[in-house]
Image (cartoon, rainbow, N blue to C red):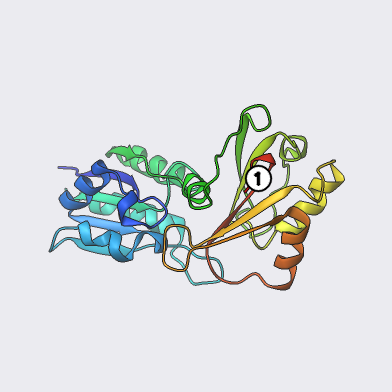
Amino acid sequence: MSGFVSFVGSGPGDPELLTLKAVARLGAADVVLFDDLSSGPLLSHVRPGAELVAVGKRAGRASPTQAHVSRLLVDHAAGGARVVRLKSGDPAIFGRLEEEIVALRAAGIAFEIVPGVTSASAAAAAAAIPLTRRLSARRVQFVTGHDVNGGLPGGLNMAALADAEATTVVFMPKRTFAELVALLVDHGLSPDTPALLAENVGNPGERIVRSTIAALAQTLRAEIGTAPALILYGPLMEDA
C-alpha cells in the first residue's frame, strides 16, 4: 500500500512562521526529507522515532542530486510511509517542486502541497517595508539569480526586470548580481535604484543592508560570503 507525500513549506527558518498545517504534518510524519535551510529548531516538531534525512543543496558544497532526492521520496512512500518533504520558504517558489511532483505522479503516489511563508515576504517584514506601494510599485516579480550551472540565466525579460515601477526580488542572487545590474542599467534602470540585501532571513545572524543596485553590485564584486540571501530592488525602498 502506497504512502503519502506532503510537500511542506518551512518558511524562512523562524519556527514561529511555520503554519499550523506544517506543524501537524511534521508531527504525523514517518520520514522527513529536509533542506539545509529547513533544519535546526524547525525539526523539533517531528515526532520521536521518525526518520530524518538531510537532502539539502547548497552552492559550492557536495549535495544529493535531484534524481536521488526524487528516488528517496518515491521509495519511502511506496513502502507505505507518511513522508514530509520539508522545503525552505514556499515549496512552489524556486524549490524544484516540479521535478519531485513528476516523479511521484509517474509512480502513482498521492501528494499534497502545504504552502509556506516565502523568504521574500519575510525579508520585507524584517526590513519593515511593503512589497507593493500604491502608485509606484503595483507589481511584484520574483526571479532567480542563477541557472542550473550557477550562472545568470539566459533569456531574461530585461524590459520587465528594468521596470522602475515594479518591486523585483532576486533569489540566490549574490554571485551574479553585478552582471545583472550591468544589464539593468543598459536597459534604462537608474544605478541609484534603491536595493536591499537580506541575509539569513528568519534565522540567527539575520542582516539587512540598504543600498542602491550599483553600490550593492560593487560590494558583491568584492565579497560574496556564504550566507543565504536575496535582494530586493525597486521604488518601495526609497523611504526605508
Question: Which residue matches tag 1?
Answer: 239
Amino acid type indicated by mark 1: Asp
Count of marks overlaid on the render: 1
Q: Secondary structure at mark 1?
A: loop
Is residue 146 visible from the viewing direction of this image? no
Q: Classify residue 8 as left or right of residue 201.
A: left
Give 10 or 50, whichever is nearer the viewer. 10
Residue 4 location (% of width, % of height):
22, 42
Picture coordinates of residue 32, whole percent (x, y)? 26, 57
Q: Is residue 10 left or right of residue 76?
A: right
Q: Residue at x 34, y 49 (%)?
A: 17
Residue 99 position within the rendered picture, expressed as x and y whole percent measured from the top left? 45, 45
Residue found at x 70% / y 59%: 176
**Label 1: few (<14), some (14–19) or many (≥20) C-alpha neighbours in 10 Å:** few
The quadrant of the image that shows the N terminus is top left
Query: Please, is residue 140 above or below residue 78 in the view?
Result: above
Viewer-proximal residue, 197 or 35?
A: 197
Using the image, determine if residue 188 lies above or below residue 39. above
Q: Which residue is outermost to the front?
A: 239
**Residue 166 in sight:** yes
Q: Quadrant of residue 138?
A: top right
Residue 226: where, in percent of width, then height? 56, 71
- The answer to which of 236 and 155 lies nearer the viewer is 236
